[in-house]
Amino acid sequence: MYRQFQYIYDNTTEEYPGVGILTASNRGIWAKDYNELASTPRNREILREIQSSAFIISLDESRPSEAVHFSRALWHGDLASGTPRGLCNRWSDKPCNFVVFDNAEAGFVGEHSVMDGTPTVRLCDDVLDLVYDPKFDRGANAIEGFIPEPLDFKLSTASMEAIVQADIAAHELIESHTLNFYRTSYGKTAIKKFGVSPDSWAQLIIQLAYRRLLGERERYGGTYEAATTRKFYKGRTEAIRVVSSEADEWVKSMDDKNASDGERKRLFDLAAKKHIALAKAAGNAQGVDRHMFGECLCDPTEFTDV
């Protein structure tokens, strides 16, 4: 969307930062900016075009060559002279964004509120299988003579000011985060041999990292994991309560010099079993996070009295 789109402002055609940056703002701010954008008939038509699409493809000028840069380039894109150019080229209010970089690397970014992780992983897996297949029809003839149609937003003064503020907010947020990873010498097969769910293992490791990051300070953020409720009518996702008393007890034991390895193992097993129980409860629609939200979204006319 960056450079592929032109933005018309005060009856002149110039290149402005992408409108897509507005979708990276907090939802309340984006709702206000959306209403401003949609205040003209042409902009409303463009927004309908974007919203009715199955997915977005962003052609990004970045050329990531190593894992951390690649991850950040997908997550929020590169910064250029303080401008979050990558986010200008996204439509973050879309469940499926495919990002293709200038060096032919590619990846996927999902917006979680209307799309669970499992179907998006399956989508990417199927795409990779198709592309890998030498018999796959890449449609070279189908795109011959195809000319993209630009979607030209007409921006008001308020929208231009909103883009400037969204740029600043995105820049500050990006600069406040760090990202890295550690490659273990083992995988899920080894974890299962210990009789532990790899999911529980991973979540407990995150809890331990939180504890060691914050020390004795009160926890000011909680980790999150989704559970699917798709076996229910209009089921979406529920949040698993990954923070538990059992998890906290195990985490404390790991840095307690007086705790034995046997005691740590006992507490770990209790915490892992608790996590599985909470995950099953969430999947059975017995969670607390999404229940009221789900009822709010339901159309009462779709149900009949029993």
Image (tube, rainbow, N blue to C red):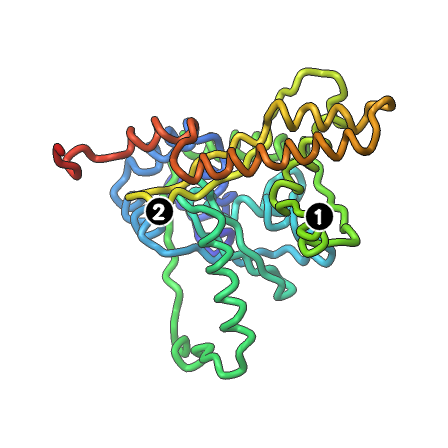
SS of the residue under disc 2: loop
Residue density around tag 1, few if under 14, some if 14–19, many if 20 or more, within 10 Å? few
Residue 253 falls in which quadrant of the image?
top right
Of residues 117 and 67, the one drawn nearer to the viewer in this rendering: 117
Q: Residue 135: x, y in percent?
A: 49, 83
Mark 2 = which residue?
231
How far is the residue under mark 1 from the one under mark 2?
Answer: 30 Å
For image coordinates 64% across by 26% down, the residue present is 246
**Above or below 241: residue 189:** below
**Tag 1: residue type?**
Phe
Q: 127 left or right of 174?
A: left
**Above or below 106: residue 109:** above
The total of numbered circles placed on residues is 2
Of residues 202 and 78, the one drawn nearer to the viewer in this rendering: 202
**Above or below 241: residue 41:** below
Residue density around tag 2, few if under 14, some if 14–19, many if 20 or more, within 10 Å? few
Q: Residue 266: x, y in percent?
A: 72, 32
SS of the residue under disc 1: loop
Q: Earlier in the sequence, mark 1 or mark 2?
A: 1
Mark 1 = which residue?
194
Residue 30 falls in which quadrant of the image?
top left
For image coordinates 75% across by 23% down, the residue present is 252
**Tag 2: residue type?**
Lys
